[in-house]
Image: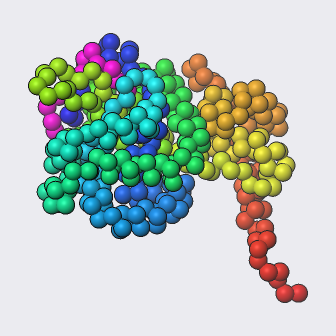
Amino acid sequence: MGIWQVDADTLAGSRFVVSSLAETTASLKKLADPTAAHPGERRWLDTHLPAYRARLAADPVTAALVGAALGRTWTADFLTPTPYGVQDLDLDEGLGRIRATSADAVRADLTVSSPGPPPSALVRADDLAERAATLLEWVWRTAVRPEWPRRRRVIEADVVARTRELTVGGWAAAFAAMRPTMRWLGDGRLRINAHDHPPRDISGARLLFVPVTPQQGWVSWPEPPAGSVAPADRYAVVYPCAGALADADRSTPPGALATLLGTARAQVLVLLERPLTTTQLVALTGQGLGSVGRHLKVLLDARLVGRRRAGRSVLYFRTATGDTLLDAQRETDDRAPDPASPPAPS
């Protein structure tokens, strides 16, 4: 499974897909292995880990299921259904597909994903698919849905960035930036990971790329019906959004800067820590194209922002003057007294 053999039709028909189910599964994987990739992820974990751990402590069977299903090198297949096509894999639809998994199929998947022999409690249980779906539903409701609009904007901005990489540098550039072990080797060979498995020929299948904001990733494809020798008709690569985009919480402007420039314009200035296109800024901020364009013109005229052309795109970036202004405003915010603190004695 380390190398996929693809043809020109597979590459030409590949698509990016936004999936609320994949985002929720990636969030569950992050809660199960709570190593933060950036400050925004650390804040999210600090907020939601206590409730997650309390839930599993009260349900030992589900806790054992999580440990077995989210293995060190493989995630149980039933937890990662593959999208059908270019549309969002709706959460309810995806959970329905998970719930429909037979007990025998779940146990077969666990024998592959579990770091060791599955615990006896899992071997005896017949409701593991329902338990997994219920846990994912809880993760969505408590930890993902409240910030899904922001996450979706980050995902859409990542798609814009990957599409540009594909346009400028071809498949080699697009694949290399997705996952550390993913590489285009030429001659139709796509290395998915470093596992030493026989190559898999996916020529003629649909290839889907599914970005998620947690720093998690996996691959999936539907298993053929029992007795069928037909190959899978679609394959999905789930990959983490670029860290600079995923930590979008950093875009909250300092209060003093928001007062000076206006909150929306200040947010654009904060986001331009790295070069971004107008389309990416629209996706990240949720503002309209016209509004972002007006903010950029004001910031350009004030020399707080510069721009340069890269291929067919125009990238905007914060200038040294913009950095100085932002740093000064952040220092002002850091020195401001906490309104809840008692006044200093005179």
Residue 216 visible here: no
Q: Is residue 136 above or below residue 176?
A: below
Q: Is residue 206 magenta?
A: yes
Magenta residue span: 196-208
Q: Is residue 93 above or below residue 103?
A: above
Residue at 71% from the left image edge and 27% from the top image edge: 289
Residue at 69% from the left image edge and 45% from the top image edge: 270
Residue at 35% from the left image edge and 68% from the top image edge: 57
Relative to 118, 30 lies left or right: right
| Residue 308 pos. (x, y %) | 65, 27
Extreme residue in the left direction: 227
Extreme residue in the bottom direction: 345
Extreme residue in the top direction: 9
What colour scheme has been applied to the protein in the rendered image?
Answer: rainbow
| Residue 309 pos. (x, y %) | 63, 24
Viewer-nearest residue: 164 or 66: 66
Which quadrant is the N terminus positioned in?
top left
| Residue 344 pos. (x, y %) | 82, 83
Residue 280 visible here: yes
Viewer-nearest residue: 182 or 148: 148
Viewer-nearest residue: 198 or 204: 204
Place residue 4 in its image quadrant.
Answer: top left
Magenta stretch, overall SS: loop
Q: Is residue 27 magenta?
A: no
Q: Is residue 11 above or below residue 157?
A: above
Relative to 189, 117 lies left or right: left
Place residue 294 in its image quadrant.
Answer: top right
Which quadrant is the C terminus positioned in?
bottom right
Relative to 281, 234 lies left or right: left
| Residue 340 pos. (x, y %) | 76, 74
